[in-house]
Every structure is written in structure tokens, then in C-alpha cells.
Image: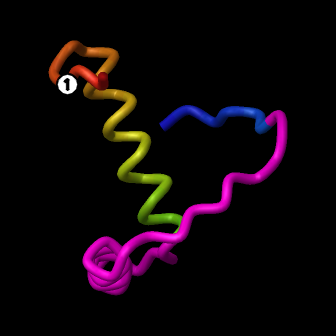
Amino acid sequence: MEQVIQKGKQISYRPRKEVRDFLEGNAAKTYRSVQGMLDYLMDRVIEMERKGELKIQ
């Protein structure tokens, strides 16, 4: 994935229990941190939107 220079403030996100459990479980399976897992998922979403496979409204 491409590296993006961060501008602005850090985003604070407090996931609900189901999302937190999903992130923690998959992060452990893939040897990532929860933040790393969330970054990976967001990279995939952005990529899918660019390709037209997903439309975010």
C-alpha cells in the first residue's frame, strides 16, 4: 500500500463491542496490532472504492 503523509490531528475512534472483537481477533491471527488491522481494512475499502467495487454514501 502507498504511504500517505498525515496532515491534521489523529482521529479517535471507539468501536462498539462487535467491531472491537472482530479487530482484536483478526489482528491476533495476522500478527498485527488493532490499529494496524484497522489501517489495513481502511486501505482495502479505499482501494475498492477507487476501483468502483464499492460505493460509499
Against 27, residue 48 (above or below) is: above
Q: Residue at x 30, y 83 (%)?
A: 21
Residue annotated with mark 1: 54
Answer left or right for 43 relative to 9.
left
Residue at (21% x, 13% y) in the render? 52
* Along the viewing direction, whichever of 39 and 10 lies nearer the viewer: 10
Q: Which residues are magenta?
A: 7-34
Tell me residue 45's x, y (percent).
Answer: 32, 37
Q: Is residue 26 left or right of residue 11?
A: left
Residue 35 percent coordinates (x, y): 54, 67
> Residue 26 falls in which quadrant of the image?
bottom left
SS under mark 1: loop
| Vertical arrangement, residue 13 with respect to residue 19, above or below | above
Give whichever of 27, 2 is nearer the camera. Answer: 27
Q: Position of residue 39 (x, y in %)?
A: 49, 53
Please name the residue shown 45% across and 75% down the image. Answer: 32
